[in-house]
Amino acid sequence: MMSVRSRPIGSATRGTTNPNRLRRMDRWIAAAHAGALRRAADPVAVDLGYGAAPWTAVELLGRLRTVRPDAQVVGVEIDPARVAAAKPYERDGLSFAHGGFEVPLPGGRRPLLIRAANVLRQYDEDQVDEVWARLCARLAPGGLVVEGTCDEIGRRHVWVALGPEGPRTLTFAARLGSLGTPSDLAERLPKALIHRNVPGEPVHAFLRDFDRAWAALAPYGALSARQRWIRTAATLRADWPVVDGPHRWRQGELTLRWDALAPRG
């Protein structure tokens, strides 16, 4: 008897995408996940919900291959028309498949990386944990889920990194020359936090401290926005569990342990 393929899990996104939109997230992945990529027997990554055009999957492959030359990327989309439109871009190491949060890969393969950018924005906050758990369950040993949100041209971006045990870190990233205050990044918080930027929640307290430190260190802006960001990050490390250092701060990034910013209740 012929088996009936189950319906993909999830809903189609708006499909908005632009070339180079996810460069900040990709750059961080290539650095933070480099060791796992180099050690992996099967270095396959998934660009989940890549949208109406395949640019982000194409770019992810190029960036991962700077670390692992035989890395592979599978773009997964719930809209079959988007998959059909992406097929002409397939080449060695790059393919596209119809699916959703079940992350279908042929031959029972498990991805070393699942990147889901601007996918959960349309879901309810109480759906996030279930989606995270489903994605993490699909990972290969040593795998990583990176889920977050950015603006249309990638100037501001916030993402969560998750392992099989759950969320690990939260990263803020920005084009520093266009940043007014760090709390401008609040509108790009992932779905798990976007409604938690209110008094009494850790992420609200952190963004308050971020803005205060940024304001106090305004004189460093005369040197550059980068120097101001670096000094601000160093100041925050005294009271918050910042897990990266000056090398990443110079890229306009700041990463903290998730448990310090996780929602209360």
Image (cartoon, rainbow, N blue to C red):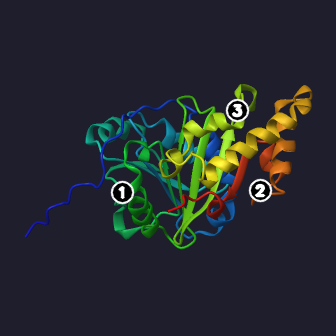
Q: Residue at x 43, y 69 (%)?
A: 137
Q: Residue at x 31, y 52 (%)?
A: 99
Dot 1, crowdedness within 10 Å: few (<14), some or many (≥20)?
Answer: many
Measured as percent of width and height from the top left, residue 16 is found at 42, 31
Measured as percent of width and height from the top left, residue 168 is found at 61, 64
Q: Residue at x 49, y 52 (%)?
A: 192
Q: Secondary structure at mark 3?
A: loop
Measured as percent of width and height from the top left, residue 153 is found at 57, 29
Per the model, the C-alpha gap separating discs 3 and 2 is: 18 Å
Dot 2, crowdedness within 10 Å: few (<14), some or many (≥20)?
Answer: some
Q: Secondary structure at mark 2?
A: loop
Q: Earlier in the sequence, mark 3 or mark 2?
A: 3
* Tag 1 near tag 3, CB within 8 Å: no
Per the model, the C-alpha gap separating discs 1 and 3 is: 30 Å
Q: Is residue 249 left or right of residue 26?
A: right
- Mark 3 residue type: Arg
- Mark 2 residue type: Asp
User: Which residue lies under the disc numbered 1?
Assistant: 101
Q: Nearer the viewer, residue 171 or 251?
A: 171
User: Which residue lies under the disc numbered 3?
Assistant: 175
* Tag 3 near tag 2, CB within 8 Å: no
Q: Residue at x 59, y 69 (%)?
A: 40
User: Which residue lies under the disc numbered 2?
Assistant: 244
Query: Which quarter of the rendering shows the N terminus?
Result: bottom left
